[in-house]
């Protein structure tokens, strides 16, 4: 069949659909899966062959969605037909298919012009450094809070109201409205991840909080750069002038709001300064190399950051005063033992019975706590604090949680029967289903970890025992699992298998059969050229009525009879 013939029931862009179908059939499975993923095709799409796939990909709504998501330079290249080949949108030479040209319209942007941000002045640079330090510290506080209790994520993707208030109370953010940007920054950097209705710290985030302030910031901004949308990235791995970001996705109506959020995250981390109508966003010196695809100039920033300290004043009123920002690793451990009461360049911490008991439940001992505080203190360990630690240590382990190896039940025991009686009637522990046994133990089907942490939260001096009866430290930190790499080939394997099975390698024959099926459904009148056994060709004018068994059936208008023609003998068809 002549591919240039006009066939009955021809739809707009039908020649493009056939060309695309042939290209799809020649693409390898990985390339096909990547295309289907980019175009957000359902894995259970009801496609029977590559022609179905091509028509669906070139449908107006599918094309409109695809071009809307293209960045400025891609749109400019696509419109000019000078860009790279884009499977699904262009032919092999990079020329867009007709439905794509229609979706692009007539007003399209030029390519992104060369542009450099203005260098920031001294005052703006100092303010940017302060914001970078504040944001980095706030992200660390967010991670510590998340390690204790996952942050609630509501249906819209925003932080839950209770956790907003908690972040304000703990001085992690100044205003509740800032909570979403802080979580977005941590998520973009891979330090927290969404899990169902919560945000959890990632393993990378748990490691990150123990780095120095300079290293924290460096890892934060490099990860932020890698998370930027492709439309604002450059070929060398950096980003374009932020003054041009609003035009990065000209056809996407949602982009301006997204661009503004990315700008806020860049300001939070000190990569751009606060701009105004005349000077949109200037650039501190430490951000220039990062913008150009290199490493950030951390030294230029660190010189403007507050000096970290590694000592505190321990006082008789059970508080600790840090005369400056405490080195991150020390701050993390101190917050596991004491409650931070104020957060500034000079922070204060208070030691309480629950905070020390919680540290012991997490694996600390009286000796390890006192050794740490002695190395940290400028004034030694005050006697009231030392007494409190020893007193709590004496009671720690009064309640023991173990597991019965025979049936997997969890056993709660204590040498103090009065404590067991209290636990048995404690309403806060009712959900555990603790059942008294012989007056000396309690038994439940709940897991050992669940029982242990429920007792710890209820302020009981609890210790976990391993299978040999020795004490064991349980890690409560619930970390997000490592994000699975999108496995597009696996996801689309069944669909691609269906498409491959329907492809016989003869594109002309497959296309002819498809168009005949369309003509039969539409009861179209065709002019059909048929090759006869003697080598000649005869033309029949038929009203197509059926197709099956490799034969086309139809009523011959001229002879007024039913004819059945072998499809393999048809050389071309056209609308009568």
Image (spheres, grey):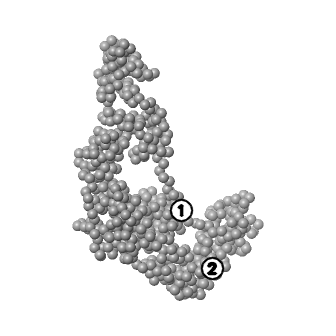
Is any atom of residue 523 visible in this view? yes
Horizontal side, residue 549 vs residue 255: left or right: right
Left or right, residue 15 beside residue 41? left
Name the image quarter holding residue 220: bottom left
Instruction: For the N terminus, give its image quadrant.
Output: top left
> Where in the figure is residue 362, as x and y percent of width and height?
60, 71
Q: Nearer the viewer, residue 81 or 461?
A: 81
Tag 2, which secondary structure? helix
List the residue tagged with mark 1.
479
Identify the residue at image location x=33%, y=16%.
Answer: 537
Dividing the picture into quarters, in which one does residue 562 lie? top left
Name the one closer to the observer, 126 or 453.
126
Density class for disc 2 (Cα within 10 Å; few <14, some 14-19, many ≥20) is: few
Q: Can residue 546 be seen in this view?
A: no
Q: Is residue 406 left or right of residue 539?
A: right
Q: How many labels does the image show?
A: 2
SS type, badge 1: loop
Which one is earlier in the sequence, the residue at label 1 or at label 2? 2
Q: Could you say which disc has been placed on residue 367 in the image? A: 2
Q: Where is residue 55 in the image (x, y as percent from the top left)?
A: 37, 36
């Amino acid at each position: 069949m002549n591919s240039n013939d006009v066939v009955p029931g021809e739809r707009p862009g039908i020649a493009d659909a056939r060309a695309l179908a042939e290209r799809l059939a020649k693409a390898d499975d990985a390339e096909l899966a990547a295309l289907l993923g980019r175009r957000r095709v359902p894995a259970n799409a009801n496609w029977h062959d590559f022609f179905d796939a091509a028509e669906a990909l070139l449908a107006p709504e599918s094309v409109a969605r695809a071009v809307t998501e293209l960045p400025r330079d891609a749109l400019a290249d696509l419109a000019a037909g000078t860009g790279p080949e884009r499977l699904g949108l262009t032919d092999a030479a990079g020329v867009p298919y007709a439905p794509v040209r229609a979706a692009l319209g007539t007003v399209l942007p030029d390519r992104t012009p060369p542009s450099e941000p203005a260098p920031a002045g001294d005052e703006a640079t100092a303010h940017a450094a302060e914001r970078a330090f504040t944001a980095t510290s706030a992200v660390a506080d967010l991670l510590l809070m998340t390690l204790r209790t996952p942050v609630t994520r509501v249906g819209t993707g925003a932080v839950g109201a209770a956790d907003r208030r908690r972040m304000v109370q703990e001085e992690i953010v100044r205003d509740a409205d800032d909570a979403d940007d802080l979580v977005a920054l941590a998520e973009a950097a891979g330090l927290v991840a969404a899990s169902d209705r919560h945000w959890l710290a990632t393993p990378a985030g748990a490691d990150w909080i123990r780095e120095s302030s300079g290293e924290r910031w460096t890892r934060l901004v490099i990860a932020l750069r890698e998370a930027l949308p492709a439309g604002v990235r450059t070929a060398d791995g950096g980003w374009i002038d932020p003054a041009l970001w609003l035009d990065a996705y000209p056809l996407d109506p949602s982009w301006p709001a997204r661009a503004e959020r990315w700008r806020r995250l860049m300001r939070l981390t000190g990569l751009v300064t606060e701009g105004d109508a005349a000077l949109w966003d200037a650039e501190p010196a430490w951000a220039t190399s990062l913008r150009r695809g290199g490493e950030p100039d951390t030294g230029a920033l660190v010189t403007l950051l507050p000096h970290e300290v590694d000592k505190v004043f321990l006082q008789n009123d059970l508080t600790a005063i840090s005369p400056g920002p405490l080195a991150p690793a020390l701050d993390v451990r101190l917050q596991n033992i004491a409650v931070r009461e104020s957060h500034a360049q000079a922070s204060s911490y208070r030691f309480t019975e629950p905070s020390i008991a919680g540290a012991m439940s997490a694996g600390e001992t009286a000796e390890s706590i006192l050794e740490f505080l002695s190395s940290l203190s400028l004034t030694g360990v005050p006697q009231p604090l030392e007494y409190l630690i020893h007193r709590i240590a004496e009671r720690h382990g009064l309640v023991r949680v173990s597991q019965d190896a025979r049936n997997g039940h969890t056993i709660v025991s204590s040498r103090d029967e009065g404590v067991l009686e209290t636990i048995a009637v404690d309403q806060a522990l009712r959900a555990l289903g603790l059942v008294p046994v012989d007056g000396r133990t309690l038994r439940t089907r709940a897991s050992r970890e669940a029982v242990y942490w429920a007792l710890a939260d209820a302020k009981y001096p609890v210790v976990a025992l391993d299978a040999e009866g020795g004490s064991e430290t349980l890690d409560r930190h619930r970390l997000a699992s490592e994000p699975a790499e999108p496995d597009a080939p696996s996801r689309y394997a069944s669909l691609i298998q269906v498409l491959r099975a329907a492809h016989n390698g003869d594109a002309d024959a497959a296309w002819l059969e498809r168009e005949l099926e369309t003509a039969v459904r539409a009861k179209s009148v065709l002019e059909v050229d048929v090759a006869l056994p003697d080598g000649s060709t005869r033309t029949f004018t038929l009203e197509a009525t059926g197709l099956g068994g490799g034969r086309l059936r139809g009523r011959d208008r001229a002879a007024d009879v039913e004819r059945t023609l072998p499809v393999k003998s048809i050389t071309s068809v056209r609308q009568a």
